[in-house]
Amino acid sequence: MIALPGLRSTRSRPSEFFDRAAQDDLLQLRNDLMTVYREFSAEDPRLFPLRYARTVPRRAHAVRASAESGAAGARPLAGPAPRNTAAPQVPVLLIPDGPARASVLPYDVLRRSLAGRGLDVLMMEHRGVGLSRLDAEGEDLPPHAMALREVVGDLVAVLDHARVPQAAVVGSGYGAYLAQMLAIFHPERVHSLVLDSPLTSAGDEAIAQEALRGLYWEGSEPSTATTARTLRRLAQDGTVDACRAGPVVLAVHEHGGPEAVRDLVDLLAVGRGHLTWTSVRQVLNQAWLQSTPYVIEHDLTARILHTELGGGHHADGGPLDPLVLEAEQARAVPPFTGEQLNLHELAPAITAPTLVLTGSQDLVSPPRIARELADRIPGAQLLEIPGARHSILDTRSRILQVAARWSACGTAAHLPERAAELAGLPVSTPDLALSRGLQIALAAERYSPWRLRLESARAERARLLRERARSDPRPHRGRRSPHERADPV
């Protein structure tokens, strides 16, 4: 089992991943990592090393070359990115989704790409994750150190240590929640905001739950009505467990879109697709136990996700509930008793120029959430990307890079006019790989030679039985074909 908060001695991960010597070795290999010592909490003055990465802009000729050819090391753009000749006014503070996601190792390439666009980029390793999970003695941070207010203080401490008076703050998902808190409580540190697929309250998951059910259970849109009707029939005849199907349908949608969900449901309807369905379900069930060191680590940050933000609180166990796994994970930490802050009420106090990003097919943080947030923040602009899904940062990073640069230049308010142009930029490589993997899995089940041979053998056997029955007048007690068993009336 994984180490639950408060049970530090039961950790089953290989200890060499997290001991102090291993972290020191990793730090010596890099020249872009900084350390600022932070208190455990306001009540506990003990210190721990908080890490953050800083990637400075490249030389002028390298920036020009990057602007002409796209991000360094990446394939050329499918279409030209919107041009912005203004110079960045401030560094960029980039906060990924989380709170379990690391910042340093997973986003190396992204930071280099942004530096190629002339940006000074800072990313903080979230407390309790990766290079910021150990205290000064090499032990995991204690549960009481996991609190939202402390994380916001960490962000301010990073800006102070980096000597950055103001930054263009770019947050995705949970990172957008932190970005809003920073803009509300420390407005002098925020030059501008980009809020990607934003989390705004514990009630957001109920909106996502309703959106998923409306699309794939009730069939509220013509494009998915047939899929929803087939899925209900599969649940009725016991082919799928409706109460646990939500996370699978959501994952397939996020990595393949409505077309992939339709293809998978159609395969299940003809007796195929079970391998893909089961594989996705197993990956989702094991994700909590199979955290990847320095990439995504759930155990210590679970208190923030579930106890403070209410992750899984709205799970109801009904058909196609996408929150059923989160509700099970929430049992490892103290229960959710309510949010400490009401960002819906506080959002009108944000004065920084704000761009809200959303994908039109996002079912984790549906566009409704982004639209309502843009209405609450004075002067905020909404940029909805056609066809995009959750987390523009992770799935359409080219768009996020353009938004970050325009925000740092003070020109992000003009980006909504370029929505169609931005939508033409290519999908991020990791998301493209996942989408293609899902397509290959569905194609393999659709055209599997073993299945074709089995079906062919069954058809041949049925033909031989029919021929034998016609040539031999004696009665046979063997199985007859469905056509022969049909009522002649």
Image (cartoon, rainbow, N blue to C red):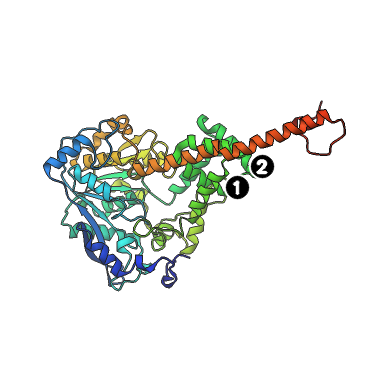
At x 12%, y 45%, the residue is 59
Q: Secondary structure at mark 2?
A: loop
Residue at disc 1, secondary structure: loop
Where residue 422 sits, quadrant-wise, is: top left
Residue 338 is at least partly visible in this image? no
- Mark 2, residue position: 237
Q: Write down the residue under mark 1.
A: 241
Give x and y (percent) for residue 385: 35, 35
Residue 199's tag is: none
Question: From the viewer's perspective, is residue 23 above or below residue 472?
Answer: below
Q: Is 248 drawn above or below residue 332 in the view shown?
A: above
Residue 21 appears left or right of 254: left
Residue at (19, 58) in percent of width and height: 31
Q: Position of residue 145 (x, y in %)?
A: 34, 66
Amino acid type of the residue that numbered disc 1 sits on in the rendered structure: Asp
| Residue at left offset 42%, top offset 37% | 361
Residue at 76% from the left image edge and 34% from the top image edge:
465
Crowd band around label 2 with a 10 angstrom C-alpha radius: few (<14), some (14–19), many (20+) = few
Residue closer to the observer: 468 or 359: 468
